[in-house]
Amino acid sequence: MPDYAHAVELLRAGELVAFPTETVYGLGADAANPQAVSRIFAIKNRPADHPLIVHLPDANAFSPWVRSIPSAARALAEAFWPGPLTLVLPRAPNVPDVVTGGQETVALRVPAHQVALKLLRAFARSGGGCGGLCGIAAPSANRFGHVSPTRAEHVREEFGDAIPLVIDGGPCPVGIESTIVDLSRGEGFAPRILRLGALPPERIEALLGTRVELPKASQKSEAPRTPLTAVKASRLPEVCEKLTAEGKKIGVLVFSPIDAELRAQARLRLPDDPEAYARALYDALHTLDAAGCDAILAESVPDDPRWRTVADRLRDQETDQVSGIRCQESDR
Ligand code: AMP
Ligand code: MG
């Protein structure tokens, strides 16, 4: 049983606490305390203009954070909170700049994870926060540019003793980040998805009865240290063969039953269902990263809306360095 009282004490003292959510592990600080929030940026090496998501204990807690609540925000919060949906709304004037990256908007979410909710409620009950602002600002608990953590061990490996408390809630049940929807442009504008995530855009469209704008390009923010590239299943045997013949150690990540045929140093096969694949993806990338390979080849995923978020994350993880080891066959 996690020591929530200790976690709350740390948060109220301006310290950081890593905790599980259904999406990934978060690195949390009292969102109303600018010094505490600054620590997140320092320890992650995160650029100051990258705003954080504020986690709330329930949908009622969001009014102090925002200037106004558009009807679409209410409807989405009611339908999908707690859950993997982040709403970007016009911020209230007293929201610290360090949380919003100086923007006029704030990103809010109620996570669907019992440990996260118990922590958030305990923090609220203790009188946590300031000036009516009660929430925990938390980005993913990894250094800037690294793979998001879906297990407490990933957080410990990344930060060692630099974080006073990592609450272990087991593996994250969703394993991929929240969908971020921007509703800050006002009633006349279509909701805009800023980041694809665990909640499919179709469900948002169905609820609101309007089209939503999809993001144009992935943000390319996080990647394993080992260069990764996507390769079609039909080309994988030949690409593995070629790179191995060049003396490269290859890690493969597939979902088709072709792993045994591939010449590789490390092979991981994930489920062929997009949700189950997403749940296992970051853990697989951590494992392959640790395997000492020169490159990771990921089997290209189907060009199908059900695989959209996974495809986005694989693109996110891709680096150009694999082409540097002359892997011209790689394509999607
Ligand atoms: P992470 O570091 O993985 O938790 O990512 C947080 C994400 O939320 C980033 O992609 C941010 O750009 C996004 N975000 C947070 N606050 C805002 C905001 N006010 N406006 C737009 N995007 C935001
Ligand atoms: Mg992140």
Image (cartoon, rainbow, N blue to C red):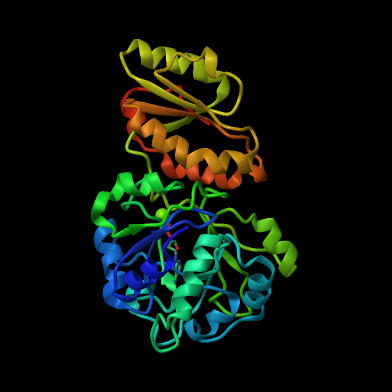
Tell whether 321 sits left or right of 282: left
Ligand 2 sits in quadrant: bottom left
Q: Is residue 278 above or below residue 193?
A: above
- Locate residue 289, reporting x and y percent: 36, 33
- Locate residue 271, reporting x and y percent: 61, 33
Based on the displayed image, in which of its 4 quarters is residue 277 positioned? top right
Tell whether 332 sits left or right of 212: left
The answer to whether residue 45 of the structure is visible from this angle is no
Q: Is residue 268 above or below residue 212?
A: above
Nearest to the observer: residue 290 or residue 152: 152
- Locate residue 126, reporting x and y percent: 43, 80
Nearest to the observer: residue 310 or residue 31: 31
Q: Is residue 314 above or below residue 142?
A: above
Tell whether 38 sits left or right of 243: left
Nearest to the observer: residue 46 or residue 183: 46
The answer to whether residue 126 of the structure is visible from this angle is yes
Q: Is residue 324 above or below residue 66?
A: above
- Locate residue 193, reporting x and y percent: 56, 62
